[in-house]
Amino acid sequence: MPEALLAHVVQSAAAAGVLGGLLTVWGIRRPSVRLRFWVLALILPAALLPLFAAVAPVRQSDHFRQHAALFVAARWTTLPVGPWRLGPALAALVAAGGVALYLRDLVPALRQGWRVGRHAPDGDPRSEEIVRRVAAQAARLGVVAPESRLVQDEEGAYLYCRGFRSPVILVSTGALATLSPEELDAALAHEIGHVAGHHLVLGWGLIALRSLLLFNPVAQILGRSAVLEMERAADDASTAALGRPAALASALAKLGVLAGDDAPTAPGGLRFHVLKGRLLRLSEGVTAPVPEAPEGLMLALAAGAVALLVFFVVA
């Protein structure tokens, strides 16, 4: 068991390294494309294992381990540390890191959901204003307007979209009091950008993958990277629709400062370094997309490179 865990972590790290390197070498900046690369890095190591076991049993032979494999987890887990073996302690440490990263993202989202559940709407007439603004931004982005709901929470300033088949945009009265009309429109367009990009469905898929790979810290980091690209893609959608990157940046700054680590829309919460990176990116404005190679070809080449490297990593 320690050998399998360590091997999978190394395979995930190899996939992350290869795909991250290709993103840099190929100069890929579009968040929608980068998102697919990180999802590929998350899925491939786990998906390739049963395939390799079926078509290449030679990977488990002693000859392959001794002469061909680049990394053999068993060699590390059997290293002596005083009277003990390294394996159990190393596996426990790695698994603890994965669980900590997973909970670090899950707990704030659960707390936010609990908080929203405590504040039911009470027929506030400002709800109609939110409905109108959501409809206007949805029309700009060319999607059906999602349901919107004003949450009676003066102390909490938050605005985000949740749901699966039927997305709902939740706006707290605290956020409504904090944001200017321009900032509110930009923030709503950002959330509708998530709907247009089908990010809610993908987000649930990422949660499922991260739950299955609970003990793999590299997989948790890859999941965070994918979420960040979804946020950047929604930033771009808002800016392209309204042409107001400064308004969106101002809204993000206000909501981020007031929400602290409980914001559910950023990996690990809206921490300063994540928020700062998005604000700096928005300050550059929306530029014309840089011509890139066909996405399918790039993903196929990347998948082949990862498969080749992962093939030589065994438990």
Image (cartoon, grey):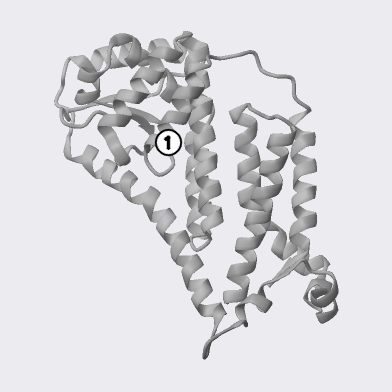
Neighbor class of circle 1 (other Cα within 10 Å; few <14, some 14-19, many 20+) is few
Give the side of residue 32 with respect to residue 191, left or right. Answer: right
Q: Say above or below: 252 vs 284.
A: below
Residue 255, quarter of picture: top left
Residue with the mark numbered 1: 273
Image spot of residue 201 (x, y percent): 50, 38
> Residue shown at 23%/19% (left/top)?
178
Image spot of residue 17 (x, y percent): 67, 49
> Residue shown at 55%/54% (left/top)?
219
Residue 165, quarter of picture: top left
Residue 131, quarter of picture: top left
> Residue shown at 18%/33% (left/top)?
120
Could one spot residue 141 in this view of the protein? no
At mark 1, the secondary structure is helix
Image spot of residue 84 (x, y percent): 52, 87
Please identify the quadrant where the N terminus is shown.
bottom right
* Residue at the farthest bottom position: 83
Give the side of residue 21 with respect to residue 159, left or right. Answer: right
Residue situated in front as seen by the camera: 312 or 166: 312
Q: Amino acid at mark 1?
A: His
> Residue shown at 37%/16% (left/top)?
134
Q: Say above or below: 36 vs 134.
A: below
Q: Say above or below: 157 vs 56.
A: above
Residue situated in front as seen by the camera: 102 or 82: 82
Give the side of residue 151 with respect to residue 88, left or right. Answer: left
